[in-house]
Amino acid sequence: MGPSLFSLSAAAALPQWLGIRDVAPRAAVAEMNLTMSLPTCAAPCLASAAANATCTATDLACICSNPALQDAARDCVQARCPFSDVLAAINVTQTACGAPVRDKTSQINDTIIPLGVVTLVIVIVRLVFKRFFSTTARLGSDDWAIAGTVAICIAGMVIGIDGLTANGIGKDVWTLTTKEVSNVALYLYILEILYFAGMSLIKLSLSLFYLHIFSGPIVRKLLWATVVFNILYGFAFVLAAIFQCSPIDYYWRRYLDAGHGTCVNINIFGWLNAAIGVAIDLWMIGLPLSQVIPLRLHWKKKIGVAIMFLLGTFVTVVSILRLQSLILFANSNNPTWDQWETAYWSIIEVNVGMICTCLPSLRLILVRLFPKIFGSSRRASYEKGNREPAASKAGHHVAIDLQDPGWHTPTGGEHASTTQDRIWGT
């Protein structure tokens, strides 16, 4: 998730409070004197703004539909009221103007529970197969990396259910208490850190997987550079997320009107992370596809191999959808409502990334279980020719055993080519 996912100030919340357009006031409160119901700090602001707009404090039709009045009251209240009083003022005016009560908290649970269960089952099946039923009967470095995301996936589910939805994410901020708002901010802070760590591990796992199957010196150098970049990228954003506010607890305690502090520029941080993430995704899709072209396989099987790698575009699509949510998040006046979407897509992105990373292993399992259906012809060859330094006078030729669904995780050279052959021998 983008940084400072819950960066709301009293000034940011006020446009929603006094930004109601064309909402018919309820008859039962038409004569309500708002100046007596509002917090002490906010009442003079509304009275002054109403007077300047030729409205009265009891003329709800005028108050609820006058943009100039709303703007004037906003400027006044942001300078006078603490956050707790801002929430109280919003609640009073929204109720008086008949604003609808919105609630989409359950949608997170309805999505992350089944998706999380499916993700965990797929990852566990992969790890069990690799450890007990593969040729080497051991886990590779790519498996250990994806195993680390299991804890993150479980933690994300718990936070989503018992943290975010339980405290009101998906509801309008003015319907919550300051304690609930602070709790949502705390859990979003934790989820943000988990998101950065999880996506970094997913990209690292995929990079290590490619290292196990590609043998050419040029592509391996590019992959090692990608591994290093993913590690540094992950550490950088995790640390930046942890220390984005000073002091750290100012991130969530500011909504309790407790203490003072500062936070980094959330717009720059959020967009930088999202842009780098999408760029890495595209790079890690294009790199293996470039190695499919010289593979001496029937064109139908080349398409099958390409499709397997292109399935990773699902993660990129989700990343872009999440990026759209950051546009609204960066300018949010109603964080518990608007930032629901960022949390929602962030959880989905981690789960989809884990599933896509496990797809090659699932293919091997299917070959092992249903060799007649998912098996293929006997042999093919892989030629690098002039694309990379030749391994022989006739070019670099590697035999491909298309019937062996076993799994190796060697470190490089010809052994890595053998692993590549077994992964691609569909």
Image (cartoon, rainbow, N blue to C red):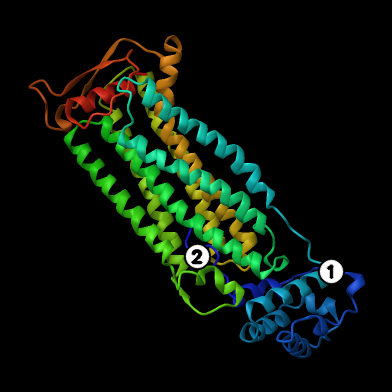
Residue tagged by mark 2?
Answer: 4
Q: Secondary structure at mark 1?
A: loop
Contact between marks 1 and 2 (CB within 8 A): the answer is: no
From the viewer's side, name the closer residue of 10 and 298. 10
The amino acid type of the residue labelled 1 equals Ala
Name the element at disc 2.
loop
Left or right: 214 with respect to 261?
Answer: left
- Residue visible at 25% across and 41% down in the picture: 223
Q: As drawn, which residue projects farthest toward the left? A: 393
Residue 217 image point, x, y percent: 17, 35
Which residue: 66% across, 86% down? 76
Labelled disc at residue 370:
none
The CA distance from mark 1 to mark 2 is 35 Å
- Residue displayed at 53% across by 79% down: 259
If you read the primary sequence from the N terminus, does the residue marked by circle 1 or circle 2 appear first? 2
Q: Residues within 10 Å of mark 2 (few under 14, many from 20)?
A: many
The residue closer to the viewer here, 298 or 236, is 236
The residue drawn where x is 37% and y is 49% is 279
Quadrant for the C terminus, please. Answer: top left
Residue 349: x and y in percent read 50, 45
Query: Does any portion of residue 285 appear in the rendered image?
Result: no
* Residue 24 circle label: 1
Q: Quadrant of residue 311?
A: top left
The image shows residue 302, relative to residue 13, as above or below, that is above
